Amino acid sequence: MSHRRRLALTTLALAFLLPALASAATPYRSPQQILDASAASDWRTPDPANLLYMDLPAGRVIIELAPQFAPRHVGNIQTFAHEHFWDGTSIYRSQDNFVVQFGDADADDAAKAKPFGSAQRKL
């Protein structure tokens, strides 16, 4: 077996093995377990200008935006929110401690998709 092939196979094996080892070393913790284990020094008061509120039947979700990392994207998200783009849309993917995705279910159909209003289509 050539050196390049052996290196490629080793790299591929590590790509599959390392995440498994990391997850075994760090067991899943629920959001409540994370909150229960936190100290007072872990908390801070967020800037109200960077908060979005999403009201759901189960309660209110507070989303903190990070303009220091992506100022143009945050501005665009704020435009969508102020223009009520997400009103009546759905959450279509949610994974604890990772991601929540929501949006227009008809976005792929130009005839049915909600208009972007004054938000930018691409950044």
Image (cartoon, rainbow, N blue to C red):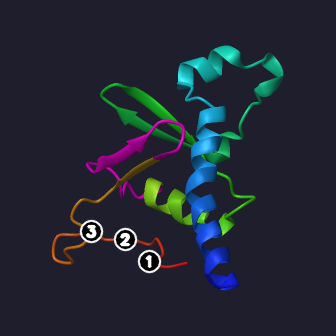
State how far apart marks 2 and 3 are (Cα): 10 Å
> In the image, what residue occupies the spot 27% across and 66% down?
114
Q: Residue at x 59, y 49 (%)?
A: 19
Q: Label 3, on which residue? A: 107
Helix, strand or loop at label 2? It is: loop
Amino acid beneath label 2: Phe
Q: How far apart are marks 1 and 3 (CA)?
A: 12 Å
Residue 55 screen position, x and y as percent: 39, 34
Magenta-tinted stretch: 82-99
Of 64 and 96, which appears nearest the observer? 96
Q: Compare marks 1 and 2 and give the one earlier in the sequence.
A: 2
Q: Residue 116 carries which label?
A: 2
**Quadrant occupied by the N terminus:** bottom right
Viewer-nearest residue: 23 or 123: 23
Residue type beneath disc 3: Ala
Q: Is residue 70 left or right of residue 56?
A: right
Instruction: Find residue 25 and report its image quarter.
Output: top right
Q: What residue type is labelled 1?
A: Arg
Task: Please rate how many residues cluster around mark 1, counting C-alpha atoms within 10 Å: few if below 14, some from 14 to 19, many from 20.
Answer: few
Above or below, comparing residue 11 to residue 54 in the picture: below
Q: Which of marks 1 and 2 is in front?
A: 1
Q: Which mark is residue 41?
A: none
Image marks 2 and 3: residues in contact by CB distance under 8 Å: no
Mark 1 to mark 2: distance in Å? Answer: 7 Å
Per the image, the residue denoted by label 1 is 121
